[in-house]
Amino acid sequence: MKHILIVEDVSEAQRWLAEIVAEAFAGARIRTANSVRAANAQLGHPLDLALIDLGLPDGSGLDVLRNTRMAHQNATCIVTTVMSDDASIVGALSAGADGYLLKETAPNVLIRQLEQLSIGLPALSPAVARRVMEHFRQTGPAAEPETQLTQREMQVLELISRGLRNSEVAAQMGIASTTVAGYIKTIYRKLGIGSRAEAAWHAARLVLKKDSTKGR
Amino acid sequence: MRRRIPPGIVLIGALILALLLGALCTRIAVDRPWLGVDLAVLQGGVVVERVVDGSPLTGSVGAAVLAIGAPGKAFVRLDAADLVEEPDALGDGMRLRRFFARQAQLDAILRSDPVLMVVEQGGSEQTIAVTAAPGRPVTDLPWPFWTQLFVGAVGWTLGAWVVTLRPRDAAAWMLLLSGLGLAMAAQAAAIYSTRELALDARTFGAVSRANGFGTLLYGIGMVTLFLIYPRRLVRGSALGLPAAMIGIMIFLVVAVDWPGNVPMVQPFVTAIMAVLLAAIVAQLVANRRDPAARAMLGWLGLSVILGAGGFVLTVIIPPLMGRPPVLEQSTAFLLFLIIYVGVALGVARYRLFDLADWSVGVLFYAIGVVLLLGLDALLIYVMAIDRLPALSLSLAAVCLIYLPLRHRLSRWSRRGSGLPMEELYRLITEIAQLPDARLQMERIKALWGDIFHPLAIHQVPQAEMGTLRAGAPILADEGRTLLIPRGVNTPAFRLDYAGQGGRLFSTRDVRQAATISHLLDDTLGRHLAYKEAVAEERTRINRDMHDNIGILLLSALHSGNAERKNTLIRQTLSDLREIVSNPMQAPLPLLHLIADLRAELGEAVEAAGVELVWEKVDLPDTTLPSQTVQMLRAFLREAVSNMLRHANARRATASVTISEGWICASLADDGSGFEVEDAVKGNGLENLRSRMLESGGEFLIDSSSTGTRVSARISLAPSPAEALG
């Protein structure tokens, strides 16, 4: 994690996040932005990890997330939020976020979560897991098979929604913790597939926007 | 069972028949020698008003025509009577005979070549030889010819329309009979009233007879119609009396010593008109207590009086009194259109002849089809162009002119609710959002009023509705009343006399009322449910704010320890997130609460390098009162944070169990223990302990050098304050 972008409009929170990131990833180059515009302007730089606040003064962090995804396919995009409801977190995951962090979390816990995320071990809270289950239940049998969860994936979700930690899930299912993390990532990906059409629409819209700005 | 032909097809047949009849009349009118002059009566003499281009008479416009003749034939002096539009008006049999004899003479002259015309201009007489063309061009036929054909076609078609829809109704057949009479009278008149100068004896005899026959047939139809419609005034064989009397008259006029009895026609028609008037008045009296029938009579009776009466008054009566007609007969025929427009409007608005408003659609349908065929035929045979462009042109004409016109006419004649759907929806939504139930009922009443404009509208107890099913309005009292039963959220209404008493409720009104009633009830229901849900949600948020956020923030405010303040504020944010995340989910299910706590506390202990194990217990899938939830959550959070700060533990076990009205929670660690009173002082545990003891629970801390166990027993019953809330 060499290049990190923090998108956060509350300056205290931005500073605090920067400190935490600096602690978690010693020697990383940290850039900050406090709006959708500022964030889009930063996308020209190399990027490994982006922490994106959902509620920005000039728009939604989801837009930043989509642009980042388009500009840097391999970057890890993490949504940071405070007081956002579970539904918007699920929305962010569908839009392609690799994970999410709650800003009220204690610093030591947050650092740990960041480190785990950066090595590909995403976390999922029981409340969000319940939302995700609900989402897949509503998608129903009519959906494409590739957007439906397998029995194992459903089992992982089920255990997480009951409050089990990744390690506990792993122990209970008799698999490795990294496998649990793999299942979670698959679940995220499948969340995203359902909303791909929408993402394509957004992408088209952004391209159009760019063109119209060029014309000016 | 006899197969019924769809009324639209029968009607198309009738229309085509009318067109064929019109074509026949046109053929008769054009198939005779033509001089190419328009003759007119001026000061008792005959003058040339207009001539066709290239005629030898070109210089003689305005000249008097004294006589016409032909080589080898005697000259006939022309007089004004030769040009009379309606010979019936000549007065007596002798003059009629003379007129018809002269017409035959004139016709013979017109068939010679050349025709010699003696004209006088500026005092000098001259004889001009004119060659009559073998036929009259269709375009030379004057407007009165076409208007009379049109009137006849309309009368016949409207009569046929009503009969096709009401084949068992004698009144409808009478209307058709009068329509047939009108068609015969008007179309026959069209031929002779617009002749250039003369018709041959055979033709004139036939069309004059047809005119008299039709006129009297019209009388039979109309008089009999008003004897039986709307109410049957005369029964049995007496009903045949008008037909018998007028029938005798027809026989006398047409078959006995023609045209000797023709002058009797006009006084007789005046008498028939008087009888008709009397019948209409009798109907009005008989139906004085029936607003619906009165409304129909208003339309039909008034139309007949205006139409037929107007014709008699302007065309027949003045000559009887020795004065010239007020209107030309050909123009006066247009008055008959009033009757048929009246019939059409009466059907559309008052279910005249019990025809529903869709019947207007059948008429338009048939007219549309025939118009298409007619235009086609016209374009193909008259304009003699290729079939394909002709079809396209007539299609275009129908699409561009007729169909939009038809659409507007149909909408106008139906005069639905007058409220477009989107306006209706807006009104209903507005009503649903009204805060006051009484106001809502008033607005619902006003809405029904706006839709149907009834004379009276009452809110009625459901008991009066009998077994009427909700959402299924019905017609009562033969369409005078519409009963709208109550819905779950709407009252029952009784609507009397639609359209300010001007029309009856139809089945279409019933369907509309059902739709609106359903929509109204549903919208009101939804809005009520919505309001309840909003109130419930507000209560939940209030309670959460009070029991949870308020306590956390208060603790943070009064905590002297900066780290403790941070912890409390973090918990506040976390709980706020949970409150906004779980709308409509009060109270929180126990299993979800435990799951959330496991995750939250798990993160904290894991980051601190402590292993937290949850004892496996089977918890019921139940919900806890909000206060219990807050206490349980606060207890476990405080216990864990206490352990992390003071106990120096490696491993801890948490457990939550439920038994007999109590929920028990405990946290045991393998740490080195601490001084209980010192650890508790100034942090959340102290506060928690007093709250638990107040609500009758228990709170224990047992710390030794081999470990600490913190446990609590919290009541599952909501506190009295919350039960009230």
Image (tube, rainbow, N blue to C red):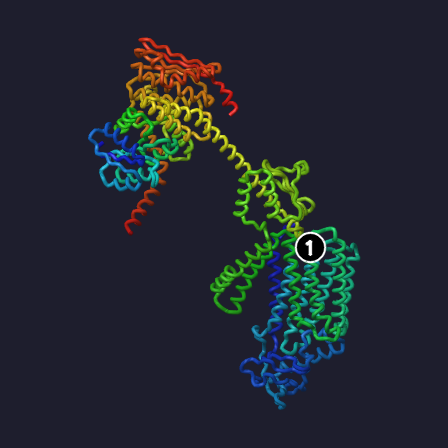
Nearer the observer, B166 or B293: B293
Nearer the observer, A92 or B157: A92
Left or right? Give the position of A110 relative to B467: left
**Which of the 4 image quadrants contains residue B349?**
bottom right
Q: Could you say where residue A168 lies in the image, as x and y percent from the top left?
A: 33, 20
Q: Could you say where residue B464 lies in the image, as x and y percent from the top left?
A: 68, 38
Q: Amino acid at mark 1?
A: Met
- Disc 1 crowd rating (10 Å Cα; few below 14, some 14-19, many 20+) is many
Nearer the observer, B222 or B303: B303
Q: Could you say where residue A34 lies in the image, as x and y percent from the top left?
A: 29, 38
Name of the residue lying farthest toward the left: A27
Q: Is residue B83 visible?
A: yes
Q: Is residue B28 above or below residue B556?
A: below
Element type at mark 1: helix
Q: Is residue B48 above or below residue B528?
A: below
Q: Residue at x 60, y 87 (%)?
A: B128
Q: Chain of mark 1?
A: B
**Which of the 4 image quadrants contains residue B524?**
top right
Residue holding disc 1 = B296
Q: Residue at x 41, y 30 (%)?
A: B581
Left or right? Give the position of B37 relative to B708: right
